[in-house]
Amino acid sequence: MTSPDVLNRVAELRASLDYHNHRYYVLDATEISDAQYDVLIRELRELEAQHPELVTPQSPTQRVGAEPSSGFAQATHAVQMFSLGNTFDDDELMAWHRRTAETLESEAFDMACELKYDGLAVALTYENGVLVRGATRGNGTVGEDVTQNLRTIRSIPLEVHGDFPARFEVRGEVLFPLSAFQRFNEERIVKELPPYAHPRNTAAGSIRQIDPQDVASRPLDIFVYGVAEPIGPDTQLGTLDYLRELGFKTNPHNALVKTAAEAADYYRTWLEGAETLDYGCDGVVIKVNRLDLQRHLGQVGREPRWAIAYKFPATQSVTQLESIEVAVGRTGRLSPYAVLTTVDVGGVQVSRATLHNEDYIKAKGIRKGDWVVVERAGEVIPQVVSVITERRTGKEPEYEMPTVCPSCDEAVVRVKNESATACVNAQCQAQLVRLLEHFVSRGSMDIDGLGIKQVISLLDNNKIKDAADLYRLQMDDLLELERMAEKSASNLLAAIEASKDRPLARLLVALGIPHVGAEVAELLSEAYPSMNELMDVDEEALTAIPSLGPKIAASVVSYFQNGPNRDMIDRLGNAGVRLQDEARPERATPTLAGLRFVVTGRLRESSRSDIQDRIKAAGGAVSGSVSKKTDYLIAGEDAGSKLADAEALGVKVITEDEFLALHSQEELSVEPSEA
Ligand code: IVH
């Protein structure tokens, strides 16, 4: 029997966790820190472990409960999931409005204006307030049952509270927030995995992952935009308000308008404003607000007459490629780009587009004179995506990558194991300009007032040869430059002075070491808060840093082994640039130091790489196969051959829960097992 105290505490913890989840994931207005949240969820986990009979599928501990599935069952939609008719200009919008007014035999009807989210449509079914099914749209009639994966999205309530029908179905769009997508890709780059290209495709792919644990590691989000059948309120916006009260995430930009002209204004606001949103938005949706009028209007085929999508202009256009030029980057990489006959791509004039590298040009068969499709996606640089070969005249020459650097004329080389071609001349002016531009930029040393023009002017006038020389500049040096008055010169000197005190991670970014961006620099400076230390570590030590891969380690070591680089760093230090971070509080002795782990099988709480990171962070070592040297095998479900190996070798086998419990209580630092 479970005591009433335990029952009460479990209920209290769940209510509190649901409340804070909702504040964090739906309202974006958190009240407690991650650490405070962790304390609560840990207490609940412990109570549920002691009283398994109290675990319910709606418990906040159960979002990632399910085992990987072998496929998805079909999910039939009791009420069809519609698509939307499209308009692309104001005239078509007006025509839709006129038709609708005629059918309704009255001029005035209010409209709900919403954003059109560029994600994946899903239907969420609740029975007695509990999420019982989540399905993809599929063909509108039959989709796939992806309940276990949708449960991992924190902004989807597993249970709602208040007044609601015994059974109802909410519909919405699953999205990968753009900032999270970028971070997700940065983490993949750190782990030396290829980044994903499109947030929408990645969101859709994520929802169809076989393992809910993988889905949970992707910070997906949702906006709900409707219900299958009315649930109380008699308008669209009233329904959305009601859904918000129940705990669903609705969009704050929904608006009510009275006229087609106002709807067109809403469209224009977001045509310009969509770039500021943290999620894909490819237009707006205009809906007749009253549900009774919606019913009266009905639908034609799969498209309701009561709603229309007003899409933003296409982000692809066709134009002619006039020539292929090559730019030299700060690491010497040659970046080919297309010079295009200027064309409008989704409202932006485009005359250049990236061609990435030699292999990309070869793979797409891009040639000078070709008619090409140019695409602009989000804030990404325009790119040439394909060639319209039908429009070739036969005179278009195949492209040859230059064999010498377009800036310094020195021979270029193909980088081993990469698609890149690079200029390896350390004195190459183009590289220096790019490197300095990068050194002074916002995310690096952030030297205000030092743009590319000033950099070129300083180099041309022999005032600097590398970044360290910036810190020796005097007033007179600057005043000799063109268009540099005393005021701006003294501002610039002050900005240079201020930059001496940047954190080590910023300096590491500024150096322009290949593969070292903000994320990697943080990892490096956390592990080695002093440049002098970092300059002498070897690849093995670097790969021991959690989530840092061998390619990055090799790049860092090779950078610091280079004499001129070391010399420049010395000169930076001598000029007063800070080369170490403030001392941090003494870290506790790693609890797993000296222990060797192997992780296998399917885990419940965390992904395998998470556990491996935690082991490494606590000073332990992780290997891929069980040997006599292994101290512990952490075995999940279906552990397979490694479990057999461990048993044969007498290696201790522990479960994930045992590891987490022991690790958090710091009790695992026992003597390593006998070999
Ligand atoms: S309403 C009228 N509202 O667009 C019923 N759909 O082309 C149709 N979409 O599959 C859905 N944002 O996934 C509606 N604010 C919004 C939407 C929206 C995006 C998607 C939806 C649907 C597709 C229809």
Image: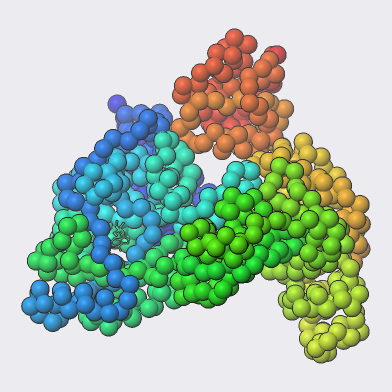
Taking the image in four quarters, ligand 1 sits in the one at bottom left
- Residue 605 in percent (x, y) is at 47, 35
- Residue 210 in percent (x, y) is at 41, 35
The quadrant where residue 485 appears: bottom right
Is 162 on the left or on the right of 428, as rendered? left
Residue 201 in view here: yes
| Colouring method of the image | rainbow
Q: Residue at x 21, y 63 (%)?
A: 239
- Which corner quadrant holds the N terminus? top left
The quadrant where residue 350 appears: bottom right
Q: Residue at x 89, y 68 (%)?
A: 465
* Above or below: residue 184 compared with residue 212: below
- Residue 400 in percent (x, y) is at 70, 56
The quadrant where residue 293 appears: bottom left
Outermost residue to the front: 394
- Residue 339 in percent (x, y) is at 62, 69
Q: Residue at x 47, y 47 (%)?
A: 218
Outermost residue to the top: 648
